[in-house]
Amino acid sequence: MKIILGPASTALGEKIADLTGFGKVSTAHKTFPDGESYVRLEDNVQNEHVVIVQTTSMPQDTRLMQLAFMANAAKRNGAQKVTAAVPYLAYARQDKMFLQGENISIETVAAMLKAAGVDALVTVNIHAEDALNKFPFPSKNLSAIPLLADYFVKEGYGKAFALAPDKGAMYIARQAQAVLRGEAGYLEKQRDRYTGKTSHTGKDFNVKGQTAIIFDDIISTGGTIVGAAKILRELGATHVFAACVHPLLIGDAETRILDAGVEEIVGTDSVPSHTSKVTLAPLFAEWLRAQKSG
Ligand code: R5P
């Protein structure tokens, strides 16, 4: 196996290559004056199973095109198999037709990647795992929640309360709870499908005097975490933290979250930023090693 260092995830790709001992394929990339993307593989991939490490966070469309171009380049240059390792898979939240006239964006993305040459895909905490069932190639979803929870254990917050900001994220809180070994619970969240605005209703659980950590897959505008943090503070939590796999942190999300009483935001290098305190490298490395030996 060889790791192709996608331009959006070069540092993560390097770490995965170091942990696995797999060879590295560097990439050259540029943007043409009209905004179009260009990518070239700088090392030999003949007869190799290549793993392209490329996140598709902002700018999503550019990074998706780069991924498709790398897959096509790998196949055209003799790669025997192309696996896309995509920490943040763009468009995964549009996995249904919520309103009449909509499309299913993630289906289109998967079809495009297949056409480009992708044979398999591995991602992390995709918003709804069911979306992978419709992909035209074998796909795997890994969870980084245990790694995030472990960060807090190492910081001395074992036994903290793991909060899911909505019922659908309770499986995430349960994964965190298994590492933290404290209590877990969820809030009721309502989202307006037209405005995207969310509101929360508190549940009956006791966080008074406790450390509480809100776990979510994504922080985008921060509205979800802000609503949850306010409720935790009202319920008397002493320390409130926010942990997520994909810290998109659009606009002033970070400021709004900290203003709502969150002491620290902890994310992963799925979307590299100063909140990326946890690396996904061991997660990918373990899965890739298992693929090689299996
Ligand atoms: C939605 O259900 C997701 O799990 C996240 O809670 C959501 O995407 C976060 O978005 P925002 O930060 O804009 O509230």
Image (cartoon, rainbow, N blue to C red):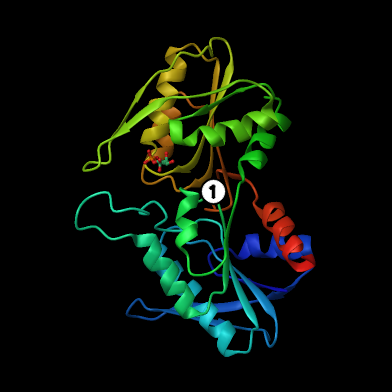
Q: Say which element carries label 1.
A: loop
With 32 as the anchor, is 73 left or right in this view?
right
Quarter of the figure that contains the N terminus: bottom right
- The residue wearing badge 1 is 125
| Amino acid tagged 1 | Asn
Q: Residue drawn 27% across and 36% down?
A: 197
What x and y, as percent, mark residue 70?
A: 53, 78
Q: Quadrant of residue 184?
A: top right
Q: Residue drawn 54% across and 78% down?
A: 71
Q: Quadrant location of ligand 1?
A: top left
What x and y, as percent, mark residue 127?
A: 46, 48
Quarter of the figure that contains the C terminus: bottom right
Q: Is residue 95 above or below residue 233?
A: below
Q: Is residue 33 above or below residue 265?
A: below
Foreground residue, 145 or 30?
A: 145
Q: Residues within 10 Å of mark 1 (few under 14, many from 20)?
A: many
With 203 as the anchor, is 269 left or right in this view?
right
Q: Residue drawn 54% across and 84% down?
A: 73
Q: Is residue 136 above or below residue 201?
A: below
